[in-house]
Structures are given as C-alpha cells and as structure tokens.
Image (spheres, rainbow, N blue to C red):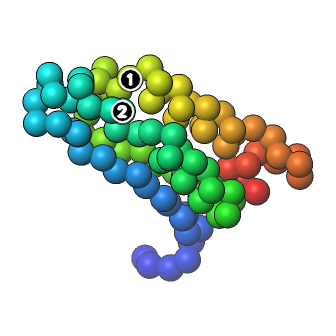
Amino acid sequence: MFGNDCPTQLVFGEAKSFRGENVEERREIDDAFDQRDIDRMKRLATEFAGSILVFSTMKKPEELSDDEIARISKLAEWGASTCESGGSRARQ
C-alpha cells in the first residue's frame, strides 16, 4: 500500500490574501503578485529544475489585474520553453 511507487514532487508556492477588507479597497491596492514575486519564483525554478510553482490567492480570478496575469503567464511560458539541453525547463 505504501511505498515509493510515485516520484516525489517539489512544490513552491506564493500565497496572498485578499489584500484589502472589501472589494473597493482591494481595487485600490497594488496587485497581489508583483514582479518581485515572479522573480523569486523564477530563481527557485532555476535552482530546482522540475519543481512545481503555485500562485495562490483568495481573490476571484476576475479580480486579478491584466498585469498580474501577464506576469504569471510569462513565467509559465518560460518554464515550458525549451532549454539548452533540449527538454523543457519544467522537466530537466
């Protein structure tokens, strides 16, 4: 029943709350995920090839800004891109 049948996965996460007490206040506050968060996660992905990156927030998807979505998408595309060894960065 228990054993080493499945490989271990290393997961890194960046978690944020609502970043405000109510909807109006949340709109006035900077993005939950800023470029520093993206850079930090990219450093972890570079150091630990094949790791899984998770961005989590209590915000509803429609409350994420276009900039947040673009930053996270760019990181995801980088992770899925081909690296020098020929494989994807996510599966080195």
Q: Residues within 10 Å of mark 1 (few under 14, many from 20)?
A: some
Which residue is situated farthest in the right direction here? 85
Q: Is residue 67 left or right of residue 77?
A: left
Mark 2 or mark 1: whose residue is earlier in sequence: 2
Front position in the image: 73 or 91: 73
Under mark 1, the amino acid is: Ser
Label 2: which secondary element: loop
Q: Quadrant of the C terminus?
A: bottom right
**Whether residue 27 can be seen here:** yes
| Disc 1 target residue | 65
Residue at 52 percent across and 35 percent down: it is 72
Location of residue 17 in the rendering, given as x and y in whole percent from the top left corner: 24, 45
Location of residue 36 in the rendering, given as x and y in whole percent from the top left corner: 50, 46
Front position in the image: 50 or 64: 64
Q: Quadrant of the N terminus?
A: bottom left
Front position in the image: 24 or 52: 24
Q: Is residue 11 left or right of residue 85?
A: left
Disc 2 to disc 1, how far (Cα)?
7 Å
Location of residue 28 in the rendering, given as x and y in whole percent from the top left corner: 24, 25
**Whether residue 6 can be seen here:** no
| Disc 2 target residue | 31
Tell me how many marks there are: 2
Q: Residues within 10 Å of mark 2 (few under 14, many from 20)?
A: some
Q: Is residue 5 left or right of residue 90?
A: left
Residue at 53 percent across and 32 percent down: it is 71
Label 1: which secondary element: loop
Q: Is residue 78 left or right of residue 37?
A: right
Residue 4, picture quadrant: bottom right
Location of residue 83 in the rendering, given as x and y in whole percent from the top left corner: 83, 46
Residue at 60 percent across and 38 percent down: it is 75
Q: Tell me if residue 83 comes above or below residue 29 in the rendering.
A: below
Callout 2–callout 1 Cβ contact below 8 Å: yes
